[in-house]
């Protein structure tokens, strides 16, 4: 493919599909359908014919210098929420020196209940960065408070 198509991206080719490299995850250790690219269509589908989705291919207008970010904040935590998690458990993860929190919510961004939020609000407001993501590989996270 590289010699015949202009696809200026890093890709993962697996099971007749070329997927965007930075959007591909391994979903199985034993299946032949081991890699997926959630919420992103394959760049190329290969069968009898090769179909390239040119609309999905990112074509930069300029090339920037590659930068490695080696100063990462060690005071960021990932907290996986589940229906029976207690506010006290979350409070434990939010104690100083925590500066950032990534909440891995269930469903489409669900958290246990309003009492859980109000019990954790003070600690959540103290952190500098707060992100939420769904535990599902497909779909989006919705903030509904």
Image (tube, grey):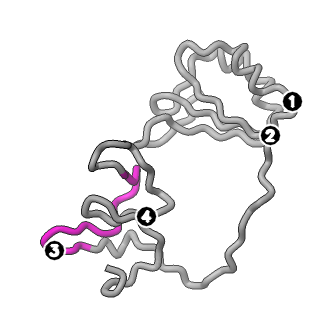
* Residue depicted at 43% across the width and 42% down the height: 137
Which quarter shows the C terminus? top right
Q: Earlier in the sequence, mark 3 or mark 4?
A: 4
Please identify the quarter of the rendering in which residue 104 is found: top right
Query: Which residue position holds label 1?
Result: 96
Element under disc 4: strand
* Disc 2 + disc 4, Cβ < 8 Å: no
Give the distance between the C-alpha atoms of the residues marked 3 and 4, in whole angstroms: 20 Å
Q: Which residue is mark 4?
A: 20
**N-term mark: 1 or 3:** 3
The range drawn in magenta is 35-51
* Marks 1 and 4 in Cβ contact (< 8 Å): no
In the rendered image, the vertical position of residue 109 relative to residue 10, given as above or below: above
Question: Are discs 3 and 4 less than 8 Å apart at CB?
Answer: no
Q: Residue at x 67, y 20 (%)?
A: 117
From the top left corner, tell me how far across and down residue 36 is, in percent: 37, 51
Identify whether 49 is placed above or below 94: below
Q: Residues within 10 Å of mark 1 (few under 14, many from 20)?
A: few
Q: Which mark is residue 75?
A: 2
Q: Is residue 109 above or below residue 57?
A: above
Q: Position of residue 61 (x, y in %)?
A: 55, 84
Left or right relative to 97: residue 81: left
Q: Which residue is mark 3?
A: 49
Location of residue 133 in the rendering, given as x and y in whole percent from the top left corner:
55, 39
User: How far is disc 1 from disc 3 in space, using C-alphas?
Assistant: 57 Å
Q: Position of residue 52 (x, y in %)?
A: 28, 74
Report crowding for label 3: few under 14, some 14 to 19, many 20 or more residues within 10 A (C-alpha): few
User: Cα distance, mark 1 to mark 2?
Assistant: 9 Å
């Amino acid at each position: 493919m590289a010699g015949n198509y202009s696809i200026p991206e890093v890709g993962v080719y697996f099971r007749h599909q070329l997927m965007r490299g930075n959007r591909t995850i391994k979903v199985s250790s034993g299946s032949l359908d081991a890699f997926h690219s959630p919420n992103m269509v394959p760049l190329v589908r290969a069968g009898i014919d090769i179909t390239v989705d040119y609309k999905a291919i990112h074509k930069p207008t300029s090339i920037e210098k590659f930068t490695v970010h080696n100063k990462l904040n060690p005071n960021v935590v990932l907290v996986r929420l589940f229906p029976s998690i207690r506010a006290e458990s979350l409070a434990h993860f939010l104690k100083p020196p925590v500066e950032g929190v990534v909440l891995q919510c269930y469903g489409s961004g669900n958290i246990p209940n309003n009492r859980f939020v109000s019990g954790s609000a003070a600690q959540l407001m103290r952190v500098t960065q707060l992100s939420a993501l769904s535990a599902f590989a497909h779909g989006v996270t919705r903030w509904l408070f």
